Amino acid sequence: PESAQPVEILLVEDNPVDAMMIKEALHLAKIRHQLSLVEDGEAALRYLRNEPPHESPARPDVVILDLRLPRVSGHAVLGAMKADPGLRPIPVLILTTSSAQRDIAKSYDLQADQFVTKPMGLNVLAGELKIIEGLAARARQ
C-alpha cells in the first residue's frame, strides 16, 4: 500500500525547540516519515533546487514551513516554490506562531495548502500534523 512508503518531509524551522517539538509530534501522530531540516529560507530554496550543499536530497512529499525565518522569509520561500513549475506541486503546510489575518491570507494567496498556528501542546500539534499524510498522498498521485 502507498502508506507503507514513509512521507518525505522538509522542515524549514529556525527555532531548535520548535523543530524538536515538531519531530516529537510527528512520532506521536504515528506518521511514518523521513525528516530533513533546514534552518532558514535560503537553505530551503537551495535544498529544493538541489543546489550545494544539497545536490541529491530526497524530493519532499510535503514542506512544513515557518513564516519567520532568517535570510529569506517563509512567504518568499512559498512564493518561489509556487512560481517554479518543478516545485509547485509540493504541498506546503505553514506552521507558524502568527495568527495574524494578513499572514493567513497572504499564505493562502501564495497557494499554501494548509495554515496551522503553532499550538502549545504536543497532542494538539500531533493532531494538526495528521493532515500531512493526506497532503503527501495527494502529491504522489
Image: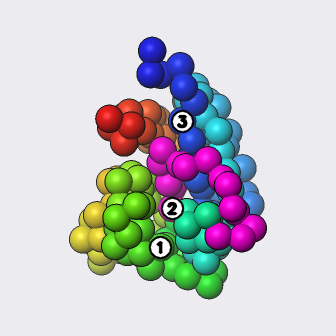
Residue at the extreme bottom of the image, as rendered: 71
Which quarter of the picture shows residue 132? top left
Residue that carries the numbered disc 1 in the rendered image: 77
Q: Which residue is mark 3?
A: 7
Q: Residue at x 28, y 64 (%)?
A: 111
Q: Is residue 119 visible?
A: no
Q: Which mark is residue 133?
A: none
Q: Quadrant of the C terminus?
A: top left
- The label nearer to you, 2 versus 1, is 1
Magenta residue span: 51-65
Q: Earlier in the sequence, mark 2 or mark 1?
A: 2
- Label 2 sits on what residue type? Leu
Residue 15 found in image quarter: bottom right
Dot 1 alpha-carbon crowd within 10 angstroms: few under 14, some 14 to 19, many 20 or more? many
Q: Which residue is mark 2?
A: 65
Q: Amino acid at mark 1?
A: Val
Query: Depth-wise, is mark 3 or mark 2 nearer the camera?
Result: 3
